[in-house]
Amino acid sequence: METVRLDGKALAAKKRESIREGVEKFTAKSGFAPGLAVIIVGDNPASHSYVRGKEKACEKAGILSEKQHLSADVSEKELLDMIGHYNEAPHIHGILVQLPLPDHISESKVIEQISADKDVDGFHPISVGRMVTGQKTLLPCTPAGIMEILKAYDITLSGKNAVVLGRSNIVGKPMAQLLLNEHATVTVCHSRTPNMKDLAKSADIVISAIGKPGLVDDTYIKEGAVVIDVGISRLEDGTLTGDVDEAAVQGQAGHLTPVPGGVGPMTITMLLANTLQAAEEQTA
Ligand SMILES: Nc1nc2c(c(=O)[nH]1)N[C@@H](CN(C=O)c1ccc(C(=O)N[C@@H](CCC(=O)O)C(=O)O)cc1)CN2
Ligand SMILES: [Mg+2]
């Protein structure tokens, strides 16, 4: 069978154009642009590259972005105080702290410090609670972007068996919840799941967010299954690769997201969408 490539990059470009139009309308009506504060701690090159991508995307969409780069040895209190400042800043409608953080800073304390109204990453327990109970909220960007890809390609979720590989708070857990909200039957696999391969092989939809290059080959995939690759690893030669061995699943998967150019560009697109949504809700 022919494997359909799920082109996240092209979908992201289309969505970003419609977000840009929404931002233009918002700005004309309110007299100010939606504002996003981006806080990055330390010097992780991948994190800086993602933050650059976010700033560039904001600029193109007409969103004001304000970056704060803190040194790796900044105290937890200083970071919490900075978030407190942005919680009160009227020109800022969204706050994101790039993850991961250095070990001496509690990720959960930092996330809980962000006002739920400005939580454009959708990681705050209030946002998570709303998502779990099916209320309107700001959704985590990567899982929300994957849902947009599935919708754009008319992939039915109701009644389907979905297997999520990985249980992180950023991707695996919220992904499972969003699929469940759309009436899929969801199994979450992790490092202590003994029969991960068998579970994946029985699924209509496999979402891999593990971070092991090439882990998912044709022995994990049922003929015709939808395969979403969230893993991004940089190999020694500098190339980016996902969790999925693309060559091995070609002809076996029904649909497949590439890496790069699949899920990643939709992550940043959903951040733009969330920032506009937050600005609209705060000025309504
Ligand atoms: N506060 C947050 N931290 C992190 C998040 C997040 O959503 N919020 N997610 C990831 C990193 N991430 C965004 O921050 C991210 C990862 C990848 C991409 C992306 O566009 N990938 C491209 C390739 C990019 C490249 O060439 O390096 C692709 O897949 O095509 C965007 C955002 C962890 N931290
Ligand atoms: Mg590849």
Image: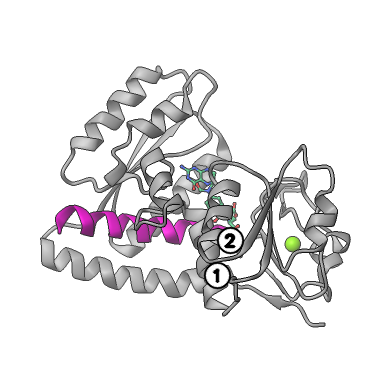
Q: Position of residue 169 (x, y in %)?
A: 54, 41
Quadrant where the N terminus is found in the figure: bottom right
Q: Residue furthest right?
A: 219
Q: What colour scheme has been applied to the protein in the rendered image?
A: one colour
Residue occupying image coordinates x 23% and y 69%: 24
| Image position, residue 37 (x, y; %) | 31, 42
User: Eyeballing the image, is 94 above or below 82?
Assistant: below
Element type where label 2 sits in the image: helix
Residue type at the position of mark 2: Val
Quadrant in which the C terminus appears: bottom left
Q: Nearer the viewer, residue 129 or 5?
A: 129
Question: Residue at the location (40% across, 68% down)?
Answer: 16
- Residue 263, label in figure: 2
- Tell me, yes or no, whether the two marked residues, 2 and 1, touch with CB atoms within 8 Å: yes
Give the amino acid type for the residue marked by disc 1 in the picture. Answer: Ile
Disc 2 packing (10 Å; few <14; some 14–19; many ≥20): many
Quadrant of the picture in which ligand 2 is shown = bottom right
Determine if the C-beta at disc 2 is less than 8 A from ligand 1. yes
Image position of 250 (left or right of 211): right
Q: Does residue 240 appear in the picture of this structure?
A: yes
- State the CA–CA distance, disc 2 to disc 1: 8 Å
Residue 4 to residue 113: above or below: below
Q: Position of residue 281 (x, y in %)?
A: 22, 56
Part of the protein shown in magenta? 263-284
Q: Secondary structure at mark 1?
A: helix
* 79 up-or-down from 100: above or below: above
Instruction: Estimate the x, y position of residue 84 in percent, counting from the top left.
Output: 25, 29
Instruction: From the image, tell me which residue sits under label 1.
Output: 149
Q: From where the camera sits, is residue 70 visible?
A: no
